[in-house]
Image: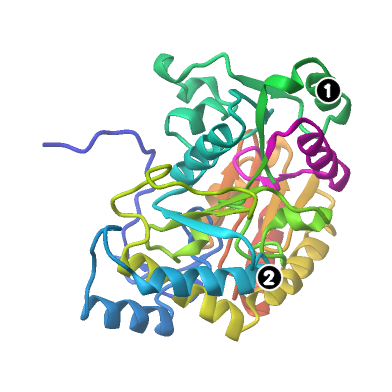
Amino acid sequence: MQLFDVYPLNDIEITKASGSNVWDANEQKYLDLYGGHAVISIGHTNPHYVTRLTDQLNKVGFYSNSVKIPLQVQLAEKLGKVSGKKDFQLFLCNSGAEANENALKLASFYNGKKKVIAFSGAFHGRTSLAVAVTDNPKIVAPVNQTENVIFLPHNNEIALEETFKAQGDEICAVIIEGIQGVGGIKEASKSFLQKIRSLCDEYNAVYIADSVQCGYGRTGLFYSHDYAGVEADVYTMAKGMGNGFPVAGISIAPKFKPWHGELGTTFGGNHLACAAALAVLEVMEKDNLMKNAEEIGNYLIEELNKFEQVKEVRGRGLMIGIELPEELAHVKKDLLFKHFIFTGEAKPNVIRLLPALNLTRENADEFLAAFSKLVK
């Protein structure tokens, strides 16, 4: 049997990792400023994280949600404290797409409506409804297509108001990333998020804050949407939640009243997943990583804005997009193969930085030195 060939691969095999560095099979050291799609939040092989998982594995690795799992309660309490949403409720699942899928399903159960507003440039996952609200027709199979999704221009308040005015009684939910990742590190404005909140209140729709990539402390706030000063009804999270262990969840406002069987999952919230997620929150809290993400992110953004060759620097904290002109399209590849620095990309020519939240000033300077050589 062969692997189903759906991933374009770099010819690199990573065999060891620590902090913000990884090493390949030839012992070449790399600086990791991508963290495997924003997954590595507290650094590779963080000692507390490794100990937490090892200790739990030596006790019990898995049992289903048919029994009490005290770790789930501990995780909910810790997440409520660190995120500032103490009165919210937690449903645990396995991936960002699954989190968004359950959030949309929950919203429809709540108000009995079907239509969902999503935005140009959005990416919400690859499962059935999550991919239907993703703005990429190429990955939406015919079976995923639905007339229930309304795509609107990003950050366009007039289009949003007009759509609610015309179809508000049918609109179930609005789903939006605080900062679009795949869409090119494009931030939703404060006024736009505030407008979503007010319209959802007026028409009894559900405001879903997709925080899968932009959340979990990456921007200096726990959920990037919070900078608008309003609360969403549901926050979805995954990626950085487990520092590499598959775990995801949705944080649900108290107005939603659960009933047995409403949502469900086999693997979601298992013992190892909870141990991983607790370790992440414990390290984030102990080492004040949200503040570090804000400070190092501000430093990187300030320095990157000094390069005349850069068209635009976008984002906040350690979620940064560097838009380059076409003649510098080689920079991402050269960063990896000439300077041994992993970064991400967004089409057509945006370099994405999504490093661990404990990235150091020295790590940032290493990147800036290499970037300077490539763009000058």
**Residue 355 lies in the magenta stretch:** no
Count of marks, rendered view: 2
Span of residues in magenta: 178-206
Left or right of residue 179, residue 103 in this image? left
Q: Foreground residue, 107 or 325? A: 107
Estimate how packed mark 1 is, as few (under 14), some (14 to 19) or many (20 or more) residues with alpha carbons within 10 Å.
few
**Residue 198 lies in the magenta stretch:** yes
Rendered image quadrant of residue 22: bottom left
Where is residue 246 shown, x and y percent of the image?
38, 57
Rendered image quadrant of residue 126: top left
Q: Foreground residue, 231 or 364? A: 231
Question: In this figure, which residue is indicated by the disc labeled 1?
Answer: 159
Left or right of residue 42, residue 84 in this image? right
Residue 268 in sight here: yes
Residue at (41% x, 78% y) in the render: 49
Residue at (59% x, 58% y) in the render: 354
Where is residue 35 shown, x and y percent of the image?
50, 61
Q: Foreground residue, 52 or 356? A: 52
Residue 311 in sight here: no
Instruction: Measure the C-alpha gap from mark 2 to mark 1.
Output: 34 Å
Q: Amino acid at mark 2?
A: Ala
Question: In this figure, which residue is indicated by the disc labeled 2?
Answer: 293
